[in-house]
Amino acid sequence: MNQSKMRRIIGKYEIGRTIGEGTFAKVKFARNTENGQPVAIKIFDKDKVLKHKLSEQIKREITTMKLVKHPNVVQLYEVMASKAKIFMVMEFVGGGELFDKIVNHGRMQEDEARKYFQQLINAVDFCHSRGVYHRDLKFISLLVQPENLLLDASGDLKVSDFGLSALSLQVQDDGLLHTTCGTPNYVAPEVINDRGYDGAAADLWSCGVILFVLLAGYLPFDDSNLMNLYKKISSAEFTCPPWISFSAMKLIAQILDPNPVHRITIPKILKDEWFKKDYRPPVFDEKKERNLDDVEAVFKDSEEYHVMENKEENPTPMNAFELISMSRGLNLGNLFHANQDFKRETKFASKRPANEIISKIEEAAKPLGFDVHKKNYKLRLENMKAGRKGNLNVATEVFQVAPSLHMVEVRKTKGDTLEFHKFYKNLSTSLQDVVWKTEEEMQEMK
């Protein structure tokens, strides 16, 4: 294939695979063609933004990220726009999600949990000092993907996704915020009661829930009935497991105080004995205030503000850096293992032509009750029958690794994870002749 025809370039960035997807935005892996730096680009469709009256929210997210420059917060490099889309070019954080450490390894030891909690408090404290309240601090986001507590390559915490943040300018005359938002299990009682709340205190409650999960391995407030969940949160009805130390329990209880007036503050947390152990204040050079002129510019229709966007018609080529960043280590064989342990996504390799792979997936999905939407070398599969968490939606995309080798990504974008596992098991059975197998795997099948 002609490599030059397969590249999608936006400004100086070469666009790669999708690494996150929400209702109104996608996050793509990309590479700066001038210096080779990997980045993540959040892409909004202008028509959807305008149709759903989200312009102010997007402007708020951009403004928020421009105001915050901190080692534990994902950095926004620049903002661009084309005639149809808005692009937020951000720091690429390749260490995975903090939540996955709990899922894969269970609860953390106190020293490890303390380190992440210290970094979280550092980030939140800095945001509050800039008049920014996150309001959606949690592990699993029901509103935006990717989830907003990430880890970098060094294992340090990075807070991302300020889509629900509120600037201090939105505080009303009573000095309180009045928008109910966030994920139920992590939301403070005063937010649920909708009587106005202090953004700093509400964020701190969410931090307390996160600390509990790190140490316990499960949520402090959980119930399948939403009203029962709200009652537990409003009365702070939770019990710490016995393996948590008394000093950690004491701090959690002070944070998860249902009365925001009595709830411990960040300055007091910084003096707490449990928190202070091995504490290292963040060291960084904060530059002068960011220029916000381009925040308005990205919504203007004038071509002088538009970036060039060149689209492709062939499978996206995957360079070596992307391939390594997606593997579980430097052993690339893990990337294509047919029985890999996946949760919300999985991948397989194929030596078949890209068109044939797409057709085979389409043929296999339709009998399973999926409506198929096709665009170039991407498929969006929607189960017409609603499951436990609504309709299961699956995104697939074919990437070219080499002229005769493709990688196929299968990713859940909506619905229940267990239903996705069942779907993939059925799908893989139908694609036995498409999936590439190593000689070792062929021998095992005999």
Image (cartoon, helix red, strand yellow):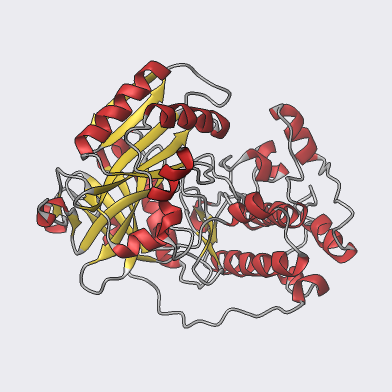
Side of 299 relative to 258 (left or right): left
Q: Give the image location of residue 244, x and y in percent.
A: 85, 59
**Looking at this view, is 12 or 169 the one in front?**
12
Residue 353 against residue 242 in the figure, above or below: above
Q: Residue at x 77, y 61 (%)?
A: 264
Q: Quadrant of the C terminus?
A: top left
Q: Is residue 241 visible?
A: yes
Q: Give the image location of residue 233, x and y in percent.
A: 76, 40
**Looking at this view, is 419 or 152 the one in front?**
419
Q: Give the image location of residue 61, x and y in percent.
A: 42, 54
- Quarter of the image for residue 298 reads bottom left
Side of 6 relative to 172 (left or right): left
Residue 263 against residue 71 in the figure, above or below: above
Q: Is residue 376 visible?
A: no
**Looking at this view, is 108 or 279 the one in front?**
108
Side of 67 relative to 306 (left or right): right
- Quarter of the image for residue 193 reads top right
**Looking at this view, is 154 or 364 the one in front?**
364
Tally of numbered discs:
0
Q: Residue at x 51, y 50 (%)?
A: 147
Q: Residue at x 75, y 52 (%)?
A: 260
Q: Residue at x 50, y 43 (%)?
A: 339
Q: Give the image location of residue 135, x and y in percent.
A: 58, 50
